[in-house]
Image (cartoon, coloured by chain):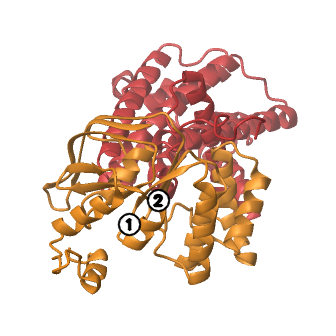
Amino acid sequence: MTAGSPLSSVETARSPSFRTCLRIQIRTIFALILRETRVRYGRSRMGYAWAFIEPILIVAFISLAISGIIGRRALSYEFGIFYALGVVNFQFFRHACIFIGQSIEANAPLFNYPAVHEVDAALARIILEAATYLVINLAIFLFIVLVFGATWPAHPEAMIIAFLGLAMLAFGVGLNLAALQRRFEMTLQIYGLVTAPLLLLSAVIFSLENVSPEYRAILIWNPVVHGVEGARMGYYTSYGETYVSFGYLYFVGLTAVALGLFQVLLTRRGMR
Amino acid sequence: MIRLIDVTKTYRMQGGGRRWVLNGVTVTLPRRNIGILGRNGAGKSTLLRMISGIVDPDRGRIHRDVRVSWPIGFRGSFQKQLTGLENVRFVARLYGMDEREVIRKVADFAELGPFLLQPVRTYSSGMNARLAFGLSMAIPFDTYLVDELMSVGDANFKQKSRDSFEALLKDSRIIMASHSMGALRSYCDSALLIDNGRVIFFDDLADGIEAYFDINGIPKDKQGRRHRRNAAEWSFDSDD
């Protein structure tokens, strides 16, 4: 603690100053992130490594399987890049939704501390999850570029915009799930069931470029498509410009976040 | 100063219906040691939770310009899979305290020995209480909110809590919910009685306790005193 009166140098539970509030919130989220890494990955040393190994294995498996189906054409890294772009971003979205959906339930004892708000617990989780997947993305691309000599992304900024859009969407969906989970214990099971076909509806293992216009017109209502195909748009020099809309992705994401915040505040008023 | 302004709080009962805790209450809590009195289910814990800020009222505002603790009690505020030490570290970070200093104080107070490095789920309720209490003593607050903590622990722990509380009360004050009149008499000098969605503040704790016995229907004897044995039974209030 700093010099001076011990009580005046520390903040009140609800401080009037915005900057103090912000500082407390950042401190809280930081403490929560450290705590999350301990609980989630701390059980075994392999735990955190698995977060990286899993998507890489999936990408490798899908590329192998598809190149086997398509024919004897040499297994090229081109497949790997295409599926990596789809699978990693999709996995991120899917994991993040559920991870945040569990954030309130999993942190229940910590809401006994006034500084810990339900939204902070969700924020800590999306920050941790996004950071993890950013590293995974980077590792995969460094690997493909350095080992196979693939080209560097054409528009890396578009890839980042797509990724952040998915992060916001996952945060919004996760907040809603977390609030609903407080009222209905079955929420996450039902969500898992309902969204099981999402992999096939999100252009993960195929390209919307190859989908006929009438089906494409349906699929583009799925906001996840714009994150997944948006990442590809960022990698290739010319891809998906005609149908990918970041505006739509961010609009749905923001709406979900607003609704989620509202729901979480509502459940806070009831004593769960 | 802590002020409740037109605060209303209800909570949903399982299977429908709502229970009133506070019904449009406006009250100012002076900077004193206050005992919160009320029957089981009257809302003592909910009031403490609202004062600390972990539960929002349905309507109205709660204004506090002092540093208020979380409600200190034996109910877990710990993450069960984490060790006691990791939990302590988390709270120290949360309040921006020097981690090592807090850990040293808690280890000193709680006397958990090697259990400090074990997951909290392996703790007995007494160990849990010792850790919770030690942790709250290690972080300075203007106002400590205490929820029925005094009634747990062995004689040694009770004595220790009493000593450290008395040391704290020089600079801080407490707001304490308890069914134990003895505990309230040792720490508090005024009272807040919750009954049926209303609160009454008593300048003198003794008046508050009288009113509390009245709403519990504990009779006076000829000298105008409550029957001691009877009062003790009622003070644990297991009627609902």
1 and 2 marks on the same chain: yes
Chain ID, mark 2: B
Please give the name of the residue rendered at 73% of the width and 42% of the height, measured from the top-left corner. Answer: A75
* Left or right position of B186 against B86: left
Residue B111 appears in which quarter of the rendering?
bottom right
Q: Residue furthest front?
A: B223
Q: Which residue is mark 2?
A: B146
In the picture, measured across the screen, residue A87 lies left or right of residue B110, that is: left
C-alpha distance separating marks 1 and 2: 8 Å
For the point 38% across and 31% down, which residue is it? A256
Whether residue A210 can be seen here:
no
Task: Name the mark on residue B178.
Answer: 1
Give the colour in which the image draws chain B: orange
Residue that appears at 57% across and 69% down: B162
* Rendering colour (chain A): red
Vertical side of B56 occupied by A167: above or below: above
Q: Residues within 10 Å of mark 1 (few under 14, many from 20)?
A: many
Across and down, in percent, residue A181 comes to 36, 52
Give the structural element (helix, strand or loop) at label 2. strand
